[in-house]
Image (cartoon, rainbow, N blue to C red):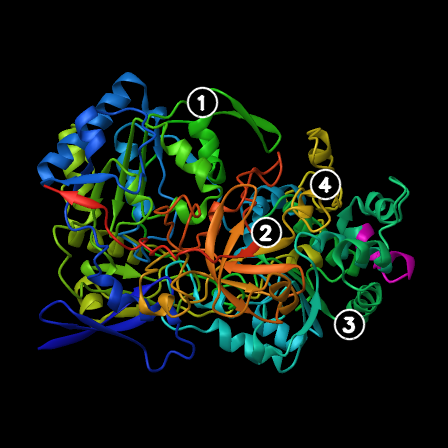
Amino acid sequence: MSRTQETSAHWGTYRVEASADGREIVAAHSDDPDAAPAIGNVAGAHRHRSRVARPSVRRRWLENGPGPDTGRGAPAGEYVEVGWDTALDLASRELERIRSSAGNQAIFGGSYGWGSAGRLHHAQSQLHRFLNTLGGYTRSVNDYSRGASMVLLPHLIGAPAMLGLRYKPVSWHDIAEHTDLLVSFGGLRRSNTWVVPGGHARHVGSGLARKMGRSTEVVSVSAQRDDAFAEVGAEWVGVMPATDTAVLLALIHVLVVDGLSDEEFLAKYTVGAEAVRRYVLGETDGIAKTPEWAERISRTPAEVIRGLAHRMAAGRTLVNIVYSLQRGERGEQPVFAGLTLAAFLGQIGLPGGGFSHGFGSMGDYGVGVAGARLPTFPQGANPVPDYIPCARISDLLLHPGEEIPYNGTHLRLPETKLAYWAGGNPFHHHQDLRRLRQALSRLDTFVVHETHWTPTARHADIVLPVAGTLERDDLAAGAGDSRLRASPRAVAPFGEAREELWIYTQLARRLGEDFAEGLDSRQWLERIYEQWRAQPDAPPAPPFAKFWRDGGVPLPQNPYQDTVFAAFRADPVAHPLETPSGRIELFSETLAGFGLPDFAGHAEWREPAQWWGAPLAREFGLHLLCNQPSHRLHSQLDMGAASQSTKVAGREPLRLHPADAAARGLTDGDVALVRSAQGSLLAGVVVTDALLPGVAQMHTGAWFDPSAPEIADCVHGNVNVLTRDVGTSTLTQATSGAHVLVAVAKYDGPLPPVRAHEPPALST
């Protein structure tokens, strides 16, 4: 006998049919207009052999005790399965040892990731609350998605407007009604609209984009022709990776020299336009930023740039910068230049016009609904002041006591003895995995909560098995969602897996602390729901018991009218931005005053180390784009059917232009050895003319497989063995992992098996 019920993930709400023996059949809602393929991963992943069944301890750590160990993460490393009491005793004793002997700043709370869509079983919130009850921890700030923008934009438009760009941008409805031309730098990917933090009841972003495409002209500026919705009929303008800034500056140059810039807007709403004007005309450095200059850098034809500038000035235009553009060396610059271009067009704050930063990056971006307040699990306060930008985790572990520049100041890196990770996989998010593995080897102890034997779990000393989304009760909703949903447990936890709230409660008791306030998870669900329901701005909602029986409650779908910059446009004196001038800062005296060696007060072009014109390109002649996958979220459930359906020869696919493939003797289905200055991998070849010549592309998220190091650092195709672990700049210290120069050759040797989804050697 089976039962069917609804559950939620970051990639959507779907139904689960669970049978008595624990097998489940997963299907999308029949009325979801654009269900995510990632739903197809759930059935095969739930009881996959890579599930963590029992608490496990790395044998070398168990026998030799805590301390640095270069054997951490070795493919042949063995784990000992233990009982829960033993595992909790080991973990609690080590936490007590560290906080007593080295201080709480020696504990790094590493829950960065998208582990669960639940409002209670949110891995980051639970871990941070637990560590706060112990006296705090060293934390991370910002994120891998838009870390550069999160530091830059407050200097240019103020922190509230930066949040407005995320939660109240120009909407798809505005674009469909008012916009003549949408120019999106970095494409407009359909697959990214399947993903919403917290999940949505139904996917709506794709449908809104299609509707927009029927009334608005779209130009996709990208190295990939298929980087935009096929249904919107986007015109493709090719640009080499890492060179968008040059094209943006050339567009501004055309506006200036052809008398198309909006001087009234610049004078009333901005500061620094004259400095930008002098720069693009070449008065400050002797180099005019003409379309011909940009063509030599970007390979985008000068006449295409010139014509696009005139088209943008001829009607209502929206300039969109996709998140991926700022995930590279000098990644702040395309964001800075895109905002500057929009200001010179003079349409910021008009319906459907101006600047946006997120279309094509997130499924909830631009849906046009003011998101309701949602229930949250309280984390408490962290008394430890130490922090790092999240992308500097390897620096933290490798260089204790040193300082790094960040946002005009310097951060001292505390010595870290223990890292506690839950709900994330740094082997997906982080770059240069050789360096990351070296960094993790410096720890005394690495504690990880996991559902599966991910690469992170296989580098841990103590692995605690946790219940997955299908195995626990929760609440689910995302920003701008139409419904707060009950997400009941569908099946029993796998093996000896436990809810994280139970784990932290048991650990806290051993340490003499109170984590759960005497409540179990069901009682916490009721508490956070009832606290939410009691808020003055909460929508009408029944008591918890009825909410749970009904399966959810509708959330208000009120379209917001006060889009970011609208009030500022109407009256910049009454509604100034929170910048030093109260206006858009096209030249920031603050940024200039930092005196950074790699950052000026205005948008500028400087040659990065990783681009087709760099000296390094003589050895590594292809520019590899590393973007988000279409059939999984990040690295989640990579062993699932949907993700596996995209593999080539059992490995992550590598897309190549026909000319580049022919020059290397490669055809569809071949296996290639891909090398960078950082590392190497094996990948399955796909030949396509959807790329510019000289450009290659792979998805992120393949599970790291170092089982045949004599052949490659990863034989499964994790791109982060190739990418560089350097900050975008000394201002933001964000990730620069979106692209890297590589060399590609045919691999003719014996193919090693892929062991990425196998558990380690286990004993009892």
Name the N-terminal-most of marks 2 and 1: 1
Residue under the image location 81 percent in, 71 percent down:
314
Residue under the image location 84 percent in, 65 percent down:
306
Which residue, given by chain and number where applicable, does mark 4 sit on?
581
Which residue, given by chain and number where applicable, does mark 1 sit on?
400
| Extent of the magenta region | 255-267
Classed neighbour count for the residue bearing mark 2: other residues with Cα under 10 Å, few (<14), some (14–19), many (≥20): some
Please tell me whether the stretch drawn in magenta is mainly helix, strand or loop.
helix
Question: Up-down: is 563 above or below 178?
Answer: above
Classed neighbour count for the residue bearing mark 1: other residues with Cα under 10 Å, few (<14), some (14–19), many (≥20): few
Which residue, given by chain and number where applicable, does mark 2 sit on?
743
Query: Which marked residue is nearer to the observer: mark 4 or mark 1?
Result: 1
Name the N-terminal-most of marks 2 and 4: 4
Kindly indicate whether the residue at mark 2 contacts the one at mark 3 (C-beta within 8 angstroms).
Answer: no
Name the N-terminal-most of marks 1 and 3: 3
Which residue, given by chain and number where applicable, does mark 3 sit on?
315
User: Between 49 and 103, which is closer to the camera in this rendering?
Assistant: 49
Q: Amino acid at mark 1?
A: Pro
**Tag 1 secondary structure:** loop
**Tag 3 secondary structure:** loop
